[in-house]
Amino acid sequence: MAPEEICGILKSEFGEAVEDACLDCGRPYALVSADSWPKIARFLRDDARLGFNLLCCITSLDMLAENKLAAIYDVCRIPFEGKADLLEFVHEFAVRIEVDRDSPSIPSVAEIWPAADWHEREAFDMMGIVFDGHPDLRRILCPDDWVGYPLLKDYEFPVEYQGIPGTTEHELLSPRH
Amino acid sequence: MSWIENRFEEGVMVTSLDWAINWGRSSSVWPMTFGLACCAIEMMAVGASRFDFDRFGAGAFRAAPRQADLMIVAGTVTYKMASRLKRLYNQMAEPKYVMAMGACTVGGGPYFKHGYHVVKGVDLVVPVDVYVPGCPPRPEALIEGLIRLQDKIKHQTRAKKSMNTFREAAIA
């Protein structure tokens, strides 16, 4: 199914919740509001026409200039056994959610796609996006006592961690964006 | 320090004993498998038949710190790994040696500037005996590192070191 059709279905179903869409870009996506995201996610999975049964990945994005954080969910439909027409069946789409950078919070979809569990933990670990309703929102890569969210653009490198000094030229090398 | 170190009176010469013990220790340095990243591939190559670490008595890679003499830290040490590395080092029996293999363990390597998570040199965590630079070092370089370590072991002594002997050595 073409991205225009998918976006049309979403717009007719949810109206205002689909705030914007970019359909002619490399990776077509619809911008939706954070509040309506669980409803939309469930619809994306359960609707007979869409049937997105796989969450491929979650991309988190630091939009420092706009003071926003974004999460992009890439979903696709892969055939189960017995589906004859593969190319007709396979399709993909992306959903983008933008939240305020000071208190980033997005409803969790780990209940809908179990794959979201660890992806959301990683987005939390690296960017500090809080996924409400997540079953086990802990850091996944960094140690539990890590300070800050490393992939934020204004992140400052640790001067010292558990007695181990950080880089000796810390002042000189802290990244500027 | 092991059971035999610093047990002799001052001035006792233990050259033959030193020679025998050093020969034994340097000829059977059992490394611990401590592959953390891509350097581990080169370390495996060294252990395999083409380069054959066993020629130098160091082919018995142990998966337990209590059986190992040498920790070849092969790969990027993250802050998260550093605590585990320190614990494994503390579990090793004396005498123990550490070899820093590759740019990351020597001094942070390519992660020195932009790696928020990488320890800037494993010598900030445990004492290092031999540094083997390279990214990753070739197997020959690792063998060179082991030979340098064997040299170091062969120059150890069981004799009690006092300030006088150092002073006499300095005058001589």
Image (spheres, coloured by chain):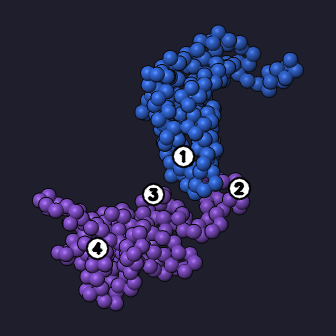
Chain colours: A purple, B blue
Q: Is residue A25 visible?
A: yes
Query: Which residue corresponds to mark 2?
Result: A169
Q: Amino acid at mark 3?
A: Leu
Q: Residue at x 45, y 75 (%)?
A: A70
Q: Residue at x 25, y 72 (%)?
A: A1
Above or below for A89 versus A13: above
Do the residues indicated by labels 2 and 1 lie within the same chain of the protein?
A: no
Q: Are marks 3 and 4 in contact (CB under 8 Å)?
A: no
Query: Which residue corresponds to mark 3?
Result: A141
Q: Residue at x 46, y 22 (%)?
A: B50
Task: Indicate which disc residue B77 carries.
Answer: 1
Q: Are marks 4 and 2 in contact (CB under 8 Å)?
A: no
Image spot of residue A61 (x, y percent): 48, 70
Check the residue under mark 1 and report the chain it is in.
Answer: B
Gap in angstroms between the C-alphas marked 4 and 1: 46 Å
Q: Residue at x 54, y 45 (%)?
A: B76
